[in-house]
Amino acid sequence: MRTNFPFILLAVTAFCGLLQSSATADIKSEAIEYSDGETTLQGHVAFDPNISGKRPGILVIHDWMGVAPYSIGRAEQLAKLGYIAFVADIYGKGVRPKDPAEASALAGKYKSDRALLRRRANAGLQKLAQHPQVDSSKVAAIGYCFGGTSVLELARSGADLRGVVSFHGGLDSPTPADGKNIKAKVLVLHGADDPYETPTDIAAFQEELRAAKVDWQMVYYGDAVHSFTQPHAGNDKSKGAAYQEAADRRSWEAMKDFFAEIFAK
Amino acid sequence: MRTNFPFILLAVTAFCGLLQSSATADIKSEAIEYSDGETTLQGHVAFDPNISGKRPGILVIHDWMGVAPYSIGRAEQLAKLGYIAFVADIYGKGVRPKDPAEASALAGKYKSDRALLRRRANAGLQKLAQHPQVDSSKVAAIGYCFGGTSVLELARSGADLRGVVSFHGGLDSPTPADGKNIKAKVLVLHGADDPYETPTDIAAFQEELRAAKVDWQMVYYGDAVHSFTQPHAGNDKSKGAAYQEAADRRSWEAMKDFFAEIFAK
């Protein structure tokens, strides 16, 4: 008998945990200005300055509230995993909605002007790639709600990404033929009871990717509605948007597995 | 500067890999007889005899070819992960189809007699639980194709399982109200282009789990058809059943994450 099974697991977990925490004690997290033509944007970078060398970069595109604590917190979580994370600003410096009504109007503006949305997302991608520690051959993008829509549009623009991950994002596309431009592998993390994604839109999205021979995966989380990763959405599922702890945790793990695969070589 | 990011990953991978391989050098893998009433069954157990102590048990239910090298190979892979794995025999000792025509007839017999299928699956579960090293509070079941159908029927029978995983299994149920008996968390790994699962059956299955408030997840793998985990299915997707390396690898990782969660405490 060599050893006990639970003991092996504990030992590995403890060892890996030790390495992880020693590498993530101090995250640098700060606002950064950049621009799209005449428009000044203000994104936010997060990384662990104690790690040397180039490493993968992750673009984070915010939900309809813009560059706000939620998206910055996700970037910091990514930084703790060892990535250079950058929250792109789609709306413009100082354009920060105060409430859902303003957020809805702003997100709607960009969702109805996909060319502008793609341009802003690409501006963020370029800013991320300029970070001296980003391995520009290893870049991916994630986004929440409106940000999920945005990373899919970024992929449809033909951006050179290894992968995109949408968390409860909108899947509809006014130009499904643009699926052929997608170079990224696509992972869609979806609340099975999300009332904002119609069966028609989901079917059209899957058909877009199928027709374009994209490498795609889509996970349906049971009993999850829109915003399932967002604690501030509350827990009343009847509103159509609510936090669901298991789906939040599982979707983050799915993203980590996806990154492990796409950045493996 | 503490260290380089890829170096940390390499070090952790090397360390964990070392532990894993030292714990999995010799897998014990052998046939075991048991019974369901008057019917003699012959299953197959696989485990690492070098690990001491109780640990989780995984029931494996075979595809339509019965207890054959493919399912035994999966049990051995599970044994290498540290589990006690047991391939249940649904058909009976010596009842081993020679070709797809015989396999289809046998699988059809059990799919049209769900009570018998449940009884045989439960007989396998009881045999697994009798293994002296199985922690009977930590048992799950996985199955491929016909075996996926079978583990879902096992769950619908009310079996005391932490989880079930279906790999390209049939999802239809003649008695959807039995969803209320399901205690297991459910993970369904599905080829998005599987022609054997109709949209109607998929919708009914999801509605069954939704209505019964089951904890469920379903992953759709793009460009994957039936049998996507089975190299012997070949690679001609136009036949509706074919191997797909990425979906095989990803679905196995999804199963591992699922087990890590359900056996965590």
Image: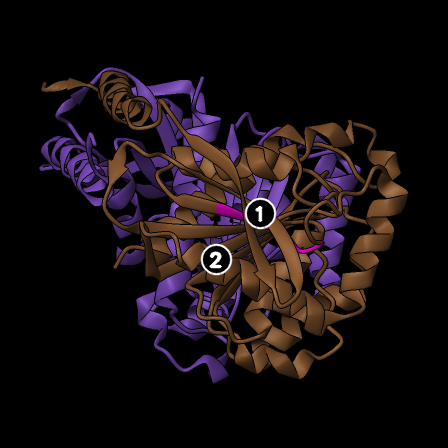
Chain colours: A brown, B purple
For badge 2, the amino acid type reads: Lys
Examine the rendered structure and indicate whether residue A225 appears above or below residue B169. Answer: above
Count the labels in the image: 2
For badge 1, the amino acid type reads: Gly
The single residue placed furthest to the front in the displayed view is A38
Examine the rendered structure and indicate whether residue B125 appears above or below residue B187. Answer: above
> Do the numbered discs 1 and 2 sit on residues whose CB atoms are within 8 Å?
yes
What is the number of the mark on residue A186?
none
Q: Which residue lies at the image location 27% right of the left edge and 20% below the top edge?
A: A18
Q: What stretch is highlighted in magenta?
A: A86-91
| A32, B154: nearer the viewer | A32
Return the chain for callout 1. Answer: A
Is residue A156 covered in magenta? Answer: no
| B112, B21: nearer the viewer | B21
Report whether A134 appears left or right of A180: left
Q: In what quadrant of the picture does the N terminus of chain A appear? A: top left
Return the chain for callout 2. Answer: A
- x, y (%) of residue A262? 36, 58
Image quadrant in which you'd find residue A20: top left
Image quadrant in which you'd find residue B213: top right
| B193, B68: nearer the viewer | B193
What residue is disc 2 on? A127
Q: In what quadrant of the picture does the C terminus of chain A appear? A: bottom left
Examine the rendered structure and indicate whether residue B202 appears above or below residue B240. Answer: above
Report whether B152 appears left or right of A176: left
Q: Which residue lies at the image location 31% right of the left edge and 70% below the top edge?
A: B232
What residue is disc 1 on? A43
Q: Which residue lies at the image location 41% right of the left edge and 19% below the top edge?
A: B136
Q: Is residue A195 in view from this perspective?
A: yes
